[in-house]
Image (cartoon, grey):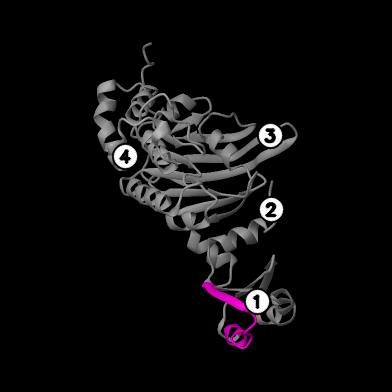
Amino acid sequence: MTADPLPSGPPSSSPAPGSPILSLSAVCKDYGTTRVVDALDLEVGRGECFALLGPNGAGKTTTLRLCLGLTAPDGGRIELGGWPVPVKGREARIRVGVVPQMDNLDPDFTASENLLVYGRYFGLADATIRARIPSLLEFASLTSKRDARIGELSGGMKRRLTLARALVNDPDLIFMDEPTTGLDPQARHLIWDRLKTLRADGKTIVLTTHFMDEAERLADRLAVIDLGHKIAEGTPRDLIAEHIEASVVEVYGDGAKAWGESEGARRSARLETSGETVFCYTDAPNPLLEHLATQPWLRYLHRPANLEDVFLKLTGREMRD
């Protein structure tokens, strides 16, 4: 079968410097009577890492499918790499890489064969793909597994191969849906290092993750969505400063809840309780810490506020199905 010719480029000439590589304007998506994406506005600049955060069911994966032209919106406008999607979804995806939430490598092929077959979907010549395979495997630290079948690879190796596969067409933009879920700390840190390398090479990354430390480490900017609505957007540092007091003191142990209701509430700017832990938020932690030092039956941890605190304040601490 002969591959379709590659599109020559977006309808306009080369994009203006600083123009967004991805933009969504008032995008809506309904499934039955449920609106899962509601009037969503987003812009992702070229060369940045943008994180999309939200609890389960917030609409993150649906938003990625909309961006890729795999799902048609019920309202609004989407432009990816200069192309309107979904109308020109195929043309837009030529310059896009995707790391899906679940690995979907072909178990009948070796690591290198998976890269070769995937590259053909983009109309690339075999000689071009074969020339790229060694560097892709090296990037994923899988050179020694070149001829290994997928069943012989660990979970971390499969995840790295999926990332390498997403780069076979030398994309400008890479969508990554929860790229490190299920990985051990060593594998997570290796993936983080590889993403930083991609950023240094000028690639744009759109990332969804449930790991707030991952978003805080990697993202230039992020948006928090819940029930299809965007409820916050900005840099990690700015969002922490805007929504959370500077210091958090976590108090736990026998009597922590009773202590929180009596002493903690008046010694903190804001107090939250989750299970047996009392979270004390304050811009002036020293008086609180001095008091806790006199309460030997309580255990506590003092730390700076982080993105997880922002996420929990905006979306709540209750479990989501």
Q: Residue at x 45, y 35 (%)?
A: 98
* Mark before the other along the chain sequence, 1 or 2: 1
Task: Say above or below: 232 vs 99.
Answer: below
Observer-side mark, 2 or 4, equals: 4
The numbered disc on residue 142 is 4
| Rendered location of residue 87, percent (x, y) | 52, 25
Label whose residue precedes the other's in the sequence (1 or 4)? 4
How far apart are labels 1 and 2 at the CA level? 25 Å
Q: Under tag 3, what secondary structure?
A: strand
Confirm whether residue 193 shows in the render: yes
Percent from the top left, x then y, of residue 141? 31, 43
Per the image, the residue denoted by label 2 is: 319
Q: Residue furthest top?
A: 1
Q: Which residues are magenta?
A: 288-303
Is label 1 or label 2 in front?
2
Q: Are marks 2 and 4 in contact (CB under 8 Å)?
A: no
Label 1 to label 3: alpha-carbon separation:
40 Å
Residue type, label 1: Ala
Q: What is the CA distance from the residue labelled 3 to the residue labelled 2?
A: 24 Å
Residue corresponding to mark 1: 269
Q: Of marks 1 and 3, which one's residue comes earlier in the chain?
A: 3
Q: Classify the position of the N terminus by image quarter.
A: top left
Q: Which mark is residue 30?
A: 3
Q: Earlier in the sequence, mark 3 or mark 4?
A: 3
278 vs 85, nearest the viewer:
278
Q: Disc 2 or 4, which lies upstream in sequence? A: 4
